[in-house]
Structures are given as structure tokens and as C-alpha cells.
Image (tube, rainbow, N blue to C red):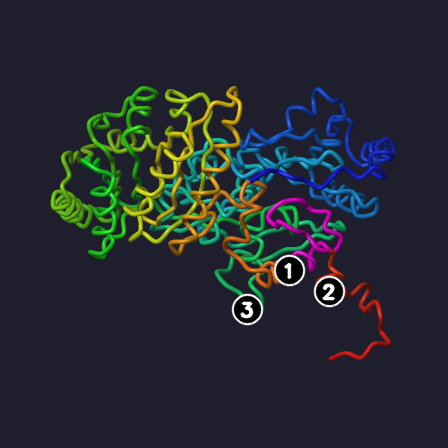
Amino acid sequence: MALAMPPPEDAILSRRDELLARLRAILPERSVIADATARRAYDCDALTMYRALPLVVVLPETVEEVRAVMALAGEMNVKVVPRGAGTSLSGGALPLEDGILLGMAKFNRILEIDFDNRCARVQPGVANLAISQAVEQRGFYYAPDPSSQIACSIGGNVAENAGGVHCLKYGLTTNNILGLEMVLMGGESVRLGGKHLDSELYDLLGLMTGSEGLLGVITEVIVRILQKPQTARGLLLGFPSIEAGARCVGAIIAQGIIPGGMEMMDNATIRAVERFQPCGYPLDAAALVIVELDGAAVEVDCLVERVEDIARGEGATTAKISQSEDERLRFWAGRKNAFPAIACIGPDYLCMDGTIPRGRLPEVLGRMDELAKARGLRVANVFHAGDGNLHPLILYDASKDGDIERAEALGADILRLCVAVGGVLTGEHGVGVEKRDLMGAMFNADDLDQQQRVKCAFDPQHRLNPGKVFPTLYRCAELGMMHVRAGQLPFPDLPRF
């Protein structure tokens, strides 16, 4: 997965002074960052093994300023990379040396809370968790809850179609948003959806969700808020083997039980979590499954007994049931802190993000262990077991020669394995630059051409977040695209079919 980004364009680099002058004419001085040291803070996202110094960083505060920046970039033919909180794990916000890094951190206000219509209108820089905190006094919350929810922004969640531990029952970001406002490459502002639940014609809202910043810059989001369930209880289930834990996951779903959340981690992760933030996890378990059941109290009590029986039938050696809200939250605290906890057992790690059919879990986990041994590396596993979204954490040491390359190679091995068993390259982290060169393992040339035609319809010059998602980028003309401008086709004398 060697990284190759588009080379800097000398024409833009030579016009940097002109670009800076024009940006300062439309933005406050504080919103244009040109100093090299200050720009260094934006040279990567959470995928830290790849870095690039942006040409300039801009931090607009209003939609009008975003439109002006995008219009200027279109006029001067400058690339633009949108950035939220920078928590992307796939390099989706990796800047370009000849491009504007458009940071949306100052768009951090909740604009409206509409309890009657069960929605909230927020700016893209609002942190995921802040939405739930803003509505909790009325018994509501926002369902998608990535592990980074205390920091990740809702705009970035939309761009990557983020999930979280409760996405099994309540869906990903795409299932929990109702509307968007976005700015296109030329500066046009477009609204999609609204407070209503559905609309006719093309599902452009669905198209934008998960588009990774390639089609437009999100400036506002209308999210769906849900009423908290009457009660929720958690179970900690320890198993003597990974295979037994994986079988239990499948057995619970097969019985028609859809938990609010169902997560799994291996012994390496259990031990790391207990060192980082003790939660009472069983250190002798080879696998730990965390199950949360929510709803009416009488229903939850019944389901807790059924799930415990299923787990015992699959060989569970530990079955601990939460007896209070504090204990339930403590069960989840370890899972939410699993990624930082891995620092206890390795100096560096690469977090992968493949998704597989649930029934293939035992096979895939065993095969991943073989792949890791072949590369001379270790893998700690933590994943959304209920929907088959794997997050293997590949442990390596960046200070050792060749370790980064081995980690990348093992990551590619794992993702190819996911596709081979009927899964996909990403469940919620996105393609970015991390999985870009593996797209051919999942899509053929015709598939990729059709996807790029969508890109061309929104961004004909490929100036918005280029170098991401597509392993080979074609000019729109090479894909047979024709674009209407001012209501006219470029060749009006040609026959139309």
C-alpha cells in the first residue's frame, strides 16, 4: 500500500503569494494560516504514518466565507482538502502541498433543537457527543457513537458514514441524518433533504454521506435525535476461545435478538484495557463479548436471561450482568478506550477497518492470526461483532527499519481477506489514502469508472480532495463526460440522444 499522492503543481506554488493575498482579502487575518510552523499542526490526520505540509490553512467562520474560498479555488484552479476534527483513520484529511486545507473547526454551533420533529440542526464542527449532551435533559440522544465521539465532528462523521458501538440496532450516520447544506467546488451552496423523513427523486443525501469530501464541503447537518430507551443493561461474557465468542455472536442474532450494541475483543486487548482503565474485565478470557440490551424493563430482563443462556451454551466461562447504570457504563468505558489502551502493549499501531459476514468471524479471525505471524507482527482485535465490522490493531514499532512497511502489508492482507470472504474494504473509517490502492480488490474497472463519473458531475476538474479513494484518477473527458454550463452544452451543434 505504498502511498503516492499527486505531485505538487509548480503553477500553483509559483502563485502562492497571489493566493494568500486574495484569501486575506475575503477572510479575517486570523483565519489564514501561512506560517510553516503553524501549518505543521495540520500535516496529517489520525493516520499519522502519512504527512504532508499544506500550502495554506484557512479556517472560515461563515457559510459565505466557505463559498468565497471555494469560488476562489475554482477560479485559480487550486485543490481543496476539507478537514473536520482530524480524527480520520484512513488519511481522508491528509493535506496536499499545493492545496488549501479548509478547516471547519469554527463551525461549532448547535443552531436549533426541534423536539417536536425529533431533530437538531447543527454545524459540521460540532462534536458527536455534544449533540447528545445538548438534548439529554429532555431524554433524547444522538445514536451513532464512534469511539472518538468526544472529539470527532459531525461533518466528518457524515463524510465517512461513521458508525459506533450502537450501530447494530440504530444504524450508521446515513440512517440518522435528515438534511445537509453543502458548498460545491465553484462556490454554489446546495441544500439536500430537511426535517421531513423522505423525498422523491435522486437520493443525493445518501450519495453525500460517505463521499469522503470528494463532492462538496458540508456546512450544516440536520440529525435525527431519538428518545432514550426506558432501560438498558449490559452483559460481560468471557469465552475460552475467540471461536467460541464468535459463535455466540452469531447465535444471539440467529435467535432474533438485536442488541443495542454487541462488541468483542481478544485477550491482548482485554489486558491492555485493564491496565489503562480497569473495568472488571476477566483477564483469563481469550475473548470478551459485551452485549447491551435496551427497551422496556420487562423485555430487557427477559432478553438478559436468554442471552446469558445462549452464552453458557456456547461455553462462556464468565457472565456478568450490570446491576446499575454506573456499572453498565463501566462495561463500555473499556471498549471506548480500547484504542488508546493499546499503547500499553506496543509503541505504534495501525487500525484497520474491514467488514465481513458475521458467519465467517471464526474463520477470518483464525486466518488473521496466521497472516500476522507470517509478517512477524502482532494483532490485537476489537470490533463491532454484531455487524461484522473488524478493527484489527496491527502492532509495530516505527523506529524499527521495515516495521511500517510490514504493518502496511499486513493491513493489505487482512483487507483482501475480508473481500475474499464476501466482505468489504471499509465499514466506517472510509477509503482515504489507506485503502485507495486496494479498491481494485473489490471493484473492477467499470465499477470504478462509474463511481468517477459521479465525482465528475460534482467536481469536473478534480480539485476537491484529489488523491483519495480512487487508485487512478481520470479526467472527465476520458470518461466521456459532458457538462452543462449556463444551461448550454459545450458543443450545442452535436446531436443529442
| Residue type, label 3 | Glu
Let me know if residue 493 is in the magenta part: no
Q: Is residue 188 left or right of residue 198?
A: right
118 and 282: which one is in front? 282
> Label 1, on which residue?
454
SS at badge 2:
loop
> Residue 3: percent from the left, percent from the top?
61, 38
| Residue type, label 1 | Val
Magenta-highlighted residues: 454-474
Quadrant of the image for the C terminus? bottom right
How far is mark 1 from mark 2, CA to CA? 10 Å
Q: Is residue 333 left or right of residue 156?
A: left
Do callouts 2 and 3 mark residues in contact (Cβ within 8 Å)?
no
> Label 2, on which residue?
481
Q: Which residue lies furthest to the front in this view?
A: 374
Mark 3: few, some, or many residues within 10 Å (few <14, many ≥20)?
few
User: Against 407, is 486 above or below?
Assistant: below
How far is mark 2 from mark 3, CA to CA? 25 Å
